[in-house]
Amino acid sequence: MLKILLAAAMALCVQASTIDEVLKQLEAVKSFSGVSISPDGHWLTWVRALPDGKTEIYLLDRKNSAAKPERITSGDPEVGRREHSVVWSPDSKQFVFLCEQTIFLADADRAKCARSPT
């Protein structure tokens, strides 16, 4: 009887360990949406979902192999926002995006943005 209990306890430990590993892997998964390529194919943007429901926009220079994704934000990068819906200008130099019902305009080559005049 003791052997059966020990075996069951060991099986539960292994199962709990496996569940913990799966949960850690799931926590590491990032969710992306709203992928957009500029009309000239030079730039790539995407929206990354955060665990708290907020989102962030990232910009990547596809022509520069050493380039790293750069976060584009409508304000303080430490404050979470809901940024989404990227639309490129026809010349690929700028794009607009929404942040909580406000339109922002960003320059692709300088990774700067400002509230769009409406």
Image (spheres, grey):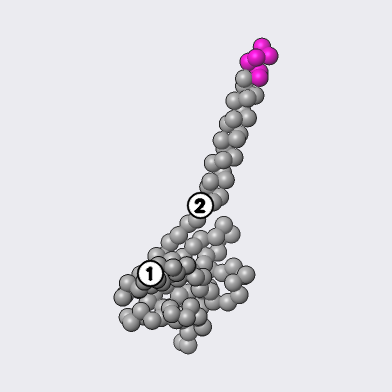
- Checking the image for residue 91, the label placed there is none
Residue furthest to the right in view is: 2
**Residue type at mark 2?**
Val
Q: Secondary structure at mark 2?
A: loop
Main SS of the magenta part reads helix
| Magenta stretch in the rendered image | 1-6
Q: Is residue 108 visible?
A: yes
Which of the two residues, 99 or 78, is positioned nearer the viewer here? 78
Residue positioned 37% across, 76% down in the render: 88
**Residue type at mark 1?**
Arg
Disc tally is 2
Residue furthest to the bottom in view is: 117
Horizontal side of residue 55 vs 66, given as left or right? right
Q: Secondary structure at mark 1?
A: loop
- In the picture of the structure, the residue carrying the numbered disc 2 is 29
Residue positioned 35% across, 79% down in the render: 92
- In the picture of the structure, the residue carrying the numbered disc 1 is 62
Residue furthest to the top in view is: 1
Does residue 20 sit above or below 59 in this rendering? above
Assign the N terminus to one quadrant of the image.
top right
Residue positioned 51% across, 61% down in the render: 49
Q: Could you give the CA–CA distance between mark 2 and mark 1, rounded to whole angstroms?
A: 23 Å
Residue 9: in magenta span: no
Q: Is residue 45 visible?
A: no
Horizontal side of residue 35 vs 101, given as left or right? left
Which of the two residues, 38 or 99, is positioned nearer the viewer here? 38
Mark 2, Cα crowd under 10 Å, few <14 / some 14-19 / many 20+, is few
Nearest-to-viewer mark from 2 and 1: 1
